[in-house]
Image: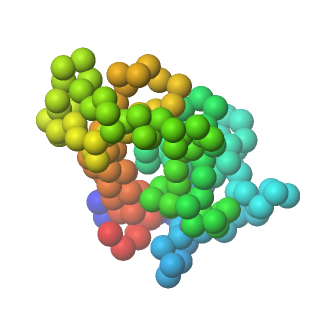
Amino acid sequence: MGGMKFDWKNLRGASPERRLFSRVRIEPNGCWEWKGVPTCNGYGRIKVEKPVLVHRFSYEFFKGPIPEGLQIDHLCGNKICVNPAHLEAVTQWENMTRAGTQVSVVNGGKTHCKRGHEFTPENIYRQPGKPAHWRICRTCERERTQRRRKSVGEELGWAA
Ligand SMILES: [Zn+2]
Ligand SMILES: [Zn+2]
């Protein structure tokens, strides 16, 4: 992808992420604001196979699938922001399960994720709705986010 110039005018047939991120501007406060026309409730929306909210799309693109039934919360309070670092999947009982993570670190005897990152209380979290032994490695998730941000950034000419 490196060096390939993004064609802002020709979005016909472009991938959903191109169509979405071509309308994003990075604001000085760190928000990635989507500059399309928002829906009546103030959120951004694009059509992929069916209409999806842009912040939900961005979360899934950078961080992975949103677990069923979860809401995506804007930590920044900016409804048109699609910066994955400002987005968090939450449920109302998330705080309870977070507390539970502290005790049961060991995943069936495993102490590291499949890429060798250690399972510490700081590095893992539980996804609500998944079995109790299900663990997400934060290091892996962060690396994936960085990879995807880099590839989108190169394509759209964002500063790295
Ligand atoms: Zn934001
Ligand atoms: Zn890992």
Q: Is residue 77 left or right of residue 123?
A: right
Asked if residue 96 is positioned above or below residue 26 in the image, the reply reads above
Residue, x 85% and y 58% (percent of image)?
Answer: 40
Q: Position of residue 105 (x, y in %)?
A: 27, 32
Which image quarter holds the C terminus? Answer: bottom left
Which image quarter holds the N terminus? Answer: bottom left
Q: Nearer the viewer, residue 46 or 146?
A: 146
Q: Position of residue 75 (x, y in %)?
A: 55, 61
Give the quadrant of residue 101. top left
Q: Nearer the viewer, residue 68 or 94?
A: 94
Residue, x 47% and y 35% (percent of image)?
Answer: 97
Residue, x 41% and y 22% (percent of image)?
Answer: 132
Q: Nearer the viewer, residue 48 or 44?
A: 44
Q: Position of residue 144 (x, y in %)?
A: 32, 46
Instruction: Say if residue 56 shows up in the picture.
Output: no
Q: Residue furthest left?
A: 116
Q: Is residue 27 left or right of residue 39?
A: left
Asked if residue 83 is positioned above or below residue 126 in the image, the reply reads below
Residue, x 21% and y 32% (percent of image)?
Answer: 113
